[in-house]
Image (tube, rainbow, N blue to C red):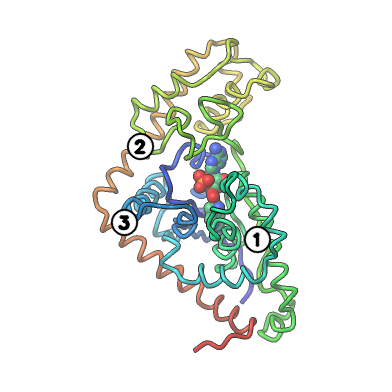
């Protein structure tokens, strides 16, 4: 089984997807469909590392799936499914719990942020989360992982796990027919675009599902009026739009809005500044609201339409899960042989 280039990525079905998810990760997911074999997952097992209301979780899984498709993921071209339908994730996750070291997980900044002060009360799942993420990727021996910058540390951990597995089981890996002793590839993050989309209320904080203020983010499900209102209310500073990139230094809110405009119109920041340099924020915000409502309005509208037929979404997920299982099966068979487990 040769290692072939393969893309894997996922998002949690918690809260609603926002512009940061879209520009930070999904735009790349969509582009990579044309060049790679892609597997995109709604990572519901990751979501339950913090409490999820069961009835809301089901809706959120469908909602994220609808947003994926509305944004341009093609369930024919790519494999699109929810994680819990493919048992390979949890199985390999357990094996990786036994490969990763406590010291490695203790360094994970996302756990420290999410667990907060009361770490004793955090779930064991939240702590082991990065091992499951490594399993998501490596169950398909995926090589490329389009994500936002905040996932870089988790990807490093996935590479460490892959390497330790390859080292620990070198003899067995060679015996299983992998002559070079390499079973798992080293998955690489693919990060482009505005690496971090910031909050509309505070340009030093990242746009996030968990920000208590809904005005801080643009949700993919917001209607055109809401998007326009949030952009009008976005924090700015008293100066206008500069003509050069240097003029954005030390002005996080201005930099963020210009970056969003550039990403939505697929042009460099320099080009945006050439067009808008010297103008007031009020004019720029109108233009930004236009491009944002055009793009997101379409995505939100299409996702709402898809949500009216939940059975069809479930069918798409089941079909994707069957295809995902077929890819993961030979990998898991090899893993079990390599580790020394008996399988039928
Ligand atoms: P999360 O919302 O934390 O589940 O993240 C899902 C994906 O979106 C990950 O690849 C993140 O890196 C990316 N992402 C989340 N928030 C942002 C943001 N504000 N800017 C850029 N990328 C983001
Ligand atoms: N940890 C990612 C996040 O919070 C979600 C995720 C889970 C993921 N498994 C993954 C991303 C595998 C890429 C590949 O956004």
Write the residue at 53% across / 10% down.
Answer: 280
Q: Secondary structure at mark 1?
A: helix
Sort mark 2 into few (<14), some (14-19) or many (20+) by Cα contacts within 10 Å.
Answer: some
Give the left or right position of residue 299, taking residue 268 as reference.
Answer: left
Q: Position of residue 231 (x, y in %)?
A: 45, 23
Q: Are marks 3 and 2 in contact (CB under 8 Å)?
A: no
The label on residue 335 is: none
* Among numbered discs 3 and 1, the one appearing first in the sequence: 1
In the image, which is nearer the foreground, mark 2 or mark 1?
A: 1
User: Could you say which quadrant of the image residue 136 lies in?
Assistant: bottom right
**Is residue 28 visible in the rendered structure shown here?**
no
Q: Residue at x 59, y 38 (%)?
A: 193
**CB atoms of marks 3 and 1 within 8 Å:** no
Mark toward the viewer: 3 or 1 = 1
**Does residue 244 appear left or right of residue 206 in this picture?**
right
Residue 308 in sight: yes
The residue at which mark 1 appears reads as 158
Distance from label 3 to label 2 (Cα)?
A: 19 Å
How crowded is the residue under tag 1: few (<14 C-alpha within 10 Å), some, or many (20+)?
many
Q: Which mark, residue 298?
A: 2
Front one among 38 and 224: 224
Q: Secondary structure at mark 2?
A: helix
For the residues marked 2 and 1, what is the alpha-carbon distance in whole angstroms? 36 Å
| Residue 242 location (% of width, % of height) | 63, 15
Quarter residue 3 falls in: bottom right
Q: Which mark is residue 313?
A: 3
Is 136 above or below relative to 303?
below
């Amino acid at each position: 089984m040769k290692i072939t280039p393969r893309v894997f990525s996922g998002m949690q079905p918690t809260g609603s997807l926002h512009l940061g998810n879209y520009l930070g990760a999904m735009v790349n997911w969509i582009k990579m469909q044309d060049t790679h074999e892609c597997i995109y997952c709604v990572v519901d097992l990751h979501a339950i590392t913090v409490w999820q209301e069961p009835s809301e979780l089901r809706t959120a899984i469908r909602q994220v799936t609808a947003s994926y498709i509305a944004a341009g993921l093609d369930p024919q071209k790519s494999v699109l499914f929810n994680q819990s339908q493919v048992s390979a994730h949890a199985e390999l996750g357990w094996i990786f719990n036994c490969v990763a070291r406590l010291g490695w997980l203790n360094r994970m900044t996302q756990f420290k942020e999410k667990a907060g002060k009361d770490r004793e009360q955090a779930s064991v799942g939240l702590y082991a989360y990065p091992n499951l993420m490594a399993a998501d990727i490596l169950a398909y021996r995926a090589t490329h992982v389009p994500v936002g910058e905040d996932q870089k540390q988790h990807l490093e951990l996935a590479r460490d796990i892959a390497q330790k597995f390859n080292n620990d089981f070198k003899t067995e890996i060679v015996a299983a027919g992998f002559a070079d002793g390499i079973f798992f590839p080293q998955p690489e993050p693919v990060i482009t675009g505005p690496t971090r989309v910031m909050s509309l209320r505070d340009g030093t904080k990242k746009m996030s599902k968990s920000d208590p203020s809904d005005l801080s983010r643009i949700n993919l499900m917001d209607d055109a009026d809401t998007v326009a209102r949030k952009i009008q209310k976005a924090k700015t500073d008293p100066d206008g739009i500069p003509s050069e990139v240097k003029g954005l230094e030390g002005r996080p809110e201005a930099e963020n809005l210009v970056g969003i405009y550039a990403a939505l119109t697929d042009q460099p920041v320099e080009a945006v500044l050439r067009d808008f340099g010297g103008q007031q924020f009020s004019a720029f915000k109108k233009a930004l609201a236009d491009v944002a409502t055009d793009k997101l309005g379409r995505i939100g509208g299409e996702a709402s339409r898809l949500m009216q037929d939940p059975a069809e979404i479930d069918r798409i997920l089941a079909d994707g899960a069957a295809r995902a299982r077929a890819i993961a099966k030979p990998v898991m068979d090899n893993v079990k042989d390599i580790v020394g487990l008996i399988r039928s």
